Amino acid sequence: MNTLSLRALDSITDVSPLAWDALLVPREMPFVRWAWLSSLEQSGCASSPAGWTPRHLTLWRGSQLVAAAPTYIKGDSDGDFARDWDLGSAALRAGLRYYPKLCVTVPFTPVAGRRILVAPGEDVQACRAALLEGALELAERERLGTVQILFSEQEEALALEQLGFARRISHQFHWTNRDDVTMDVYLSRMNSKRRSMIRREMAAPAQQGISLRTVRGYELAADSSRWARLAHALHEHTVDKLVWGRRWLNLDFYLRAFAAMPESLELVVAERDGRPIAGAFNVSTSTHLFGRYWGCFEEHPFLHFNVCLYHSVADCLARGLRVFEGGAGGEHKLSRGFEPEETYSLHRALDPRLDDALRTHLEAETPERHAALSRFRAESNIFKAGPGAKGRA
């Protein structure tokens, strides 16, 4: 690999957009683009005062960036979707250091993808090993308790496990395109109970005088500030009503992201009497759609399902997108055509006592989580069996 040097950067702006994005491959998710990370940091959403201290791990050959990982120091688990409160509280009870932790992740973004970005042509596993070694050295130097890689894609997760990290599985619910051409064809393959329920729920907006459409492309880019402000207002109005709601993303983030990468962003808008009353902020690629945040100014029966799920499923069918990830959580998605998919995180504790206990816990936990996934898969089996059925019967 010739001579490589490791640097931990205090801001994504310490590296140029061209250098960072040159590490990406065509299938890469937009969330690891420089523009997305910069929007989070420059807006203050992912900053030290907000609980996210950037320490991006980068690997250089001279002045050439050959690998990088979006990395932050966190004193808690708020907003990282690690769902590791059980691990942190157990360590606290045992008098062992768990926080602060070093997280290789994208803030507020539970979407699986590469977390260690390696330039084309480089030795991928060697670069991963070098960055992980650097992560452990940084954690030791700054007296951190644990190192995590969150929402790593499967191939990467298995490879990082071979480099000494413990792998934890969890799940989300995703919709997968089974090569149906319209929503009617898609629904026709479901069992009658679920098909009737979904048709009834899909009919509600028209009966309520509500129309839905997606704003994207030129329309969004031509007035990005308007749509950014609407997305933020919907988000803010809704999270403020929830006891557990968090204003993780501010208006400045939306303005920056909508201006910097309008080709990757979408806004589902529900209108009534010519006024926006609800919406969903989504991110897309040529193959995937990612649901991020929803909000509403008015509440109507089944409006959430239509704005966040059905409208975008129909849109994926029309555009030929392969997967729709509707966000973390939500067992209600099972009866609406979504199926469970494994997600992965990697863990390493600096204290050998905690590391041993963590690995023992995960070894016992993994079969239980596989069993839960099997139950979810059985429950999600809403498609008709028979020779004409596609996919899993």
Image: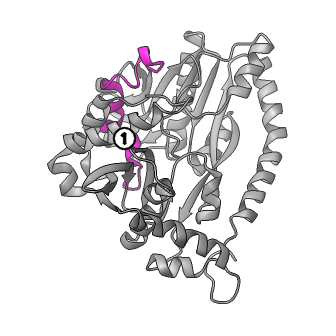
Q: Where's the N terminus, which quadrant?
A: top left
Say left or right for 300 vs 253.
Answer: right
Q: How is the image coloured?
A: one colour
Q: Is residue 55 above or below residue 192?
A: above
Q: Is residue 191 visible?
A: no
Q: Position of residue 245 (x, y in %)?
A: 51, 31
Q: How many marks?
A: 1
Q: Residue at x 40, y 38 (%)?
A: 235
Residue 97, located in which quarter of the rendered image?
top right
- Label 1 neighbourhood size at 10 Å, few (<14), some (14-19), many (20+)? many
Say left or right for 272 vs 133.
Answer: left
Say left or right for 162 vs 78.
Answer: right
Q: Position of residue 355 (x, y in %)?
A: 75, 24
Residue 293, located in which quarter of the rendered image?
top left
Q: Is residue 14 visible?
A: yes
Q: Is residue 177 above or below residue 299?
A: below
Q: Position of residue 184 (x, y in %)?
A: 48, 80
Q: Along the line of sight, which residue is nearer the eye, 305 or 383?
A: 305
Q: Is residue 195 above or below residue 132?
A: below
Q: Which residues are magenta?
A: 25-53
Q: Residue at x 46, y 70 (%)?
A: 203
Helix, strand or loop status at disc 1: helix
Q: Is 37 within the magenta?
A: yes
The residue to which callout 1 is attached is 234
Q: Residue at x 37, y 56 (%)?
A: 285
Residue 393, located in which quarter of the rendered image?
bottom right
Identity, as a three-letter code, of the amino acid under mark 1: Leu
- Residue at the limit of the structure toward the left, as seen here: 222
Q: Along the line of sight, which residue is nearer the eye, 243 or 36?
A: 243
Q: Position of residue 120 (x, y in %)?
A: 39, 48
Q: Residue at x 31, y 59 (%)?
A: 214
